[in-house]
Image (cartoon, rainbow, N blue to C red):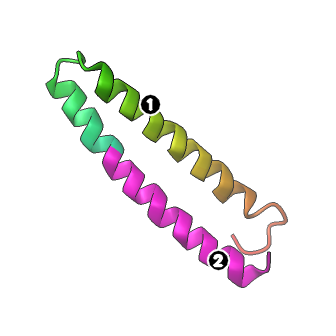
Amino acid sequence: MNDDEKGKRFLELIDEQNNLQWSVIAKLSSLINSKWNSTELQNELEALVEKHSKITKELNSLDENNSIL
């Protein structure tokens, strides 16, 4: 992958990660409001955190050779 492709992918991942972060905040707020008693919200939050982690790993892998990031 060349630097232009890496840059484009980086921006896509940052945008996706930002959207996930807002979703995590919304789910966490709902879970707090439910007095932590919603298994459904807990599962949704867990899935969002896992997806966020995968994106972070991909972001980190884009710069394996310290080329652009």
Q: From the top left corner, tell me how far across and down residue 50 is, in percent.
A: 53, 37
Q: Main secondary structure of the magenta part?
A: helix
Image x and y of residue 3, in percent:
75, 80
Task: Say how many tags the image has.
Answer: 2
Image coords of residue 1 (percent x, y): 80, 75
In the image, farthest residue toward the front: 40
Q: Residue at x 73, y 63 (%)?
A: 62
State how far apart marks 2 and 1 are (Cα): 29 Å
Residue furthest out toward the right: 65
SS category of the residue bearing label 2: helix
Is residue 55 depicted above or below 63 in this figure?
Answer: above
Q: Secondary structure at mark 1?
A: helix
The correct choice, above or below, for 10 with respect to 32 in the image is below
Q: Residues within 10 Å of mark 1 (few under 14, many from 20)?
A: some
**Rendered image quadrant of residue 34:** top left
User: Does label 2 or label 1 sit earlier along the sequence?
Assistant: 2
Segment tinted magenta in the rendering:
1-23
| Residue hosting label 2 | 7
User: Mark 2: which amino acid?
Assistant: Gly
Mark linked to residue 46: 1
In depth, the one of 26 and 47 nearer the eye is 47
Q: Residue at x 79, y 80 (%)?
A: 2
Residue at 44 percent of width and 40 percent of height? 48
* Residue 13 found in image quarter: bottom right
In the image, what residue type sits under mark 1? Glu
Depth check: 62 or 68 in front?
A: 62
Q: Residue at x 52, y 44 (%)?
A: 51
